Amino acid sequence: MTTDIINILLSGVFYASILFLVAAGLQVVFGVQKVFNLACGEFYALGAYTGVVFVKIAQGIGLPLLFSLLPLILAGLFLFFIGPIVERGLLRFVYGRDETFQLLLTFAVVLMFEDVIRFIWGTSPQSTPGVYLAYGQINLLGAIIPVYNLIVIVSSLVIAGLIGYMLVRTKFGRIIRATADNREMSEALGINMKSVYTKVFTLGTVLGTLGGALVIPATAAMTEMGVELIVMAFAVVVIGGLGSMKGAFFGALVVGILRAIAISTYPELELLLIYLIVIGVLVFRPEGLFGGSRA
Amino acid sequence: MAILSASDLRKYYGEFCALDGVSFQINEGEFVSIIGPNGAGKTTLINVLTGLLTPNTGKVFYKDKEITGIGPEKLSKLGVARSFQLVNIFPNFTVLEFLMVAVVSRLGKGTNFYSSLLHNQKVTTEALEVARLFRLDEKKDMLTKNLPQGDKKMLDVASAFALHPEVILLDEPTSGVSTSDKGKIMETLVSASKKIGIKSIIQVEHDMDIVFSFSDRIIALHQGKILADSTPAEIEKNEEVVCTVMGQKECFKIFSTLMHESTGRDGKA
Amino acid sequence: MTSYQQTSEAMGRWKMAYTALKKPKTWAILAIALFFIILPRLGSQYVSYLILTFFGYAVALLGFNLLFGYTGLLSFGHALFFAMGAYTVAFFTSKFSIFPMEIILLVAIVVSAILAALIGAVCVRYIKIYFAMLTLAFGMLFYSFLIKFYYVTGGDEGMRVLRPYLLGYELSAIPKMQFLMGGYYYYALVVLTIATWVMWKIVSSPFGLCLMAIRDNPEKATYLGVDVKRYRWYAFIISGAYAAVGGVLLAPVIGQVDPTLTYWTHSGTLVFMTLLGGFTNFLGPMLGGLIYIFLQDKVMSLTTYWRFIFGAILAFLVIVAPGGIAGVISSLVKKEKSGR
């Protein structure tokens, strides 16, 4: 019994760690630019596919499987350039407009990236065989835990900590919080909105691509992973509250653990349960756990 | 008979007290102006009276029915309407369509899915009537967003009138209008309300000339409390009101009047 | 009403019809209608087949735009009702062996109206992003139902749609294409025509005016005594029922229904079609649907990367021409008129 609980908890927290990264990307973009980026799933997918490529290259030059974490993180960071391309190239044209149009533009980005991925990698799944197992397993209170899961959880916590530190202690973080709170005031105080927006969107992008890259050893990069993930990420930000980092953290935990419970008990209920909770949250507490004002 | 009354209204925004025990009664046939410096609580009072805000304590009555916090939609059906200080319009509607919304709502035809609006004589005629009363009938097919600012304001007010309310609350009806037009606008409002059958008008106004020319009664508000509630003649003599509400210039006038009176009586300086 | 008033109203109606006939718009619509009627006779089965799928989407789009263009609510889950309609046909024909199309239509309308009433009651309390997200959530909830209860719904393989009876006629003896191009084509066209006429009445009614008022300034509408939430709810129910009818029309054409019909990206397609044609115009979304279907067909035959092209088109639309094709046409017409 305890071993089952530990297994469920840990696989739930593992998935939550990945979700947190993507959701954090969503939240920071929504908080500052008030845009709900449907394309974050595509960034996640891009990260995954690129992660496979980097790992293969690393293996090619002789890097032992154990160090595969490095190329994965590099893959996530490498894709940062997608941020400015999407933001300067498309998103900036709709900043003043109605939220629904901004949402539709991100949907257009989803469509385009779906095919970019298809174009580069085709439709067959890509994976990094052997990496997951290379990290081995440990025995925790009788349960057998893959070490890779623990590494990802730790990495995610580290990143969460870095984000928290940045938001509170650095100038950029203060700018983010100020802009999220009151855009006009921040502009009036001389903050360069254009550059803030680009930087924030890039941050959001990288968080998404990192999430995708880190999840790769545990699964495979597949064509529908982007549009499927947005469904989960969306649940996370609703439960946690739109625009809130804390919300991303706790929302991800809720969704990740719920999903793990559902998969091991009644697999049919997985999406159902999560969506019932999403709807429940939207009805009874639309601002989520930590969100700001109501709709 | 009291048509609208407020009893001990208090409204707090956190620590800040916007309304501090406001009570008054508006009777049928009265034109009442609410005056007061900025921050006195006038807009909060109007919002509470029209059910947009619920007061922390206190009640609002329409005739003998309690209407505290029932919301603007239900209120307009009962017979209380309001206009806005900042123009609140439907930019892409024509003037006629704008007024038709109010008429449709009043006639209860909002759930009429099937009949064609254009051919509905009743709705169109009534909307035109209101337009005529406000001298907007020539512009009936113009888009609201293309109207000059003054006409937009008139239209906003006209749509409230089109609801045929018994009581209407006007939030600064002449703000943003040039002084020379103010009188004309007030004349239009008063004659329109007579034709439509509005029983009482309550307005928030800053322009003292307008206030004194048209009001039967003036309520002076200051820091959430009622300073005075009486006829224009009495208010003019009330130095507290004059100084706090109407400003320094008036204050000096009153002092000199009072001083003259006192020297006159004693014969001494 | 006195008889004088009745007569003058009737005369007014004739006058309106007469003046309408003189307008080029009316002739254009009649011409298009005529084109649709003679199309199957013109030969190309493939084009007629695409038009058939268009009929289903057209009805759904009429409903969708009532919500989006006229009431200002963007639903990212409308494919839910579309799928409902389609699955109703599948269930009735292959599971319950009830074939009359009229019964299926009636049931689909009733069931989806009830479902829309329930879902709408939750959703119309919110606006903009929250409304879009909530409807997306419901759409995906339905998707998960369809997948997980596979023993009833066939899971991700879906269900077969057998041939329904039209007006009581059992036509299974006729080969498929002939059925579709013949009786079924005109049946669907008639349903579309009726649906269009009814929707036109709705948007020109006092109710329609109130919806537009709610769209443009919900606060002011409230002050004018319009029950904003209730009217949004009514609009939601009507548009849900319309989407279901559209799904019913589409199902026999595609022959197989599966859960992707309610996936959020399919809802996105409905939005795309509406935007493409122009949501500020009554016929805009239908135009968008028509163009989308043919364009998709053409582009798919040229490249597998049609999504990229469509994504680019959508981006272009949102950024440059949010009024869609109808918007572009009407601004060109305005320019011409003012130019003269």
Image (cartoon, coloured by chain):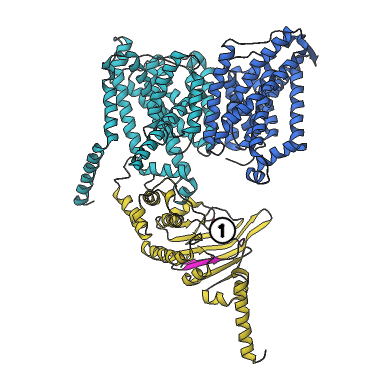
Chain colours: A blue, B yellow, C cyan
Q: Determine whether C73 is above or below B231 in the image.
A: above
Nearer the observer, C139 or A18? A18
Instruction: Residue C213 in the image: state x and y as whole percent.
Output: 43, 45
- Please give the name of the residue rendered at 48% of the width and 25% of the height, measured from the top-left corner: C313
Check the image and report above or below for C74 versus C11. above
- Label 1 resides on the chain identified as B
Residue A138, above or below B146 = above
Residue C5 coordinates in the image, percent (x, y): 22, 50
Q: Which residue is the site of mark 1?
A: B43
Q: Which residue is the extreme one toward the front? A: C340
* Identity, as a three-letter code, of the amino acid under mark 1: Thr
Chain part drawn in magenta: B24-48
Residue A237 is situated, as x and y percent measured from the top left of the image, at 63, 31
Residue C31 visible in the snapshot: yes
Q: Nearer the viewer, residue A227 or B228?
A: A227
- Report if residue C64 lies within the magenta region: no
Residue pictured at 50% horizontal, 38% vertical: C124
Q: Are there few (<14), some (14-19), or many (20+) residues within 10 Å of tag 1?
A: some
Badge 1 marks a residue whose secondary structure is helix
> Of residues C199 and A10, which is closer to you in this image?
C199
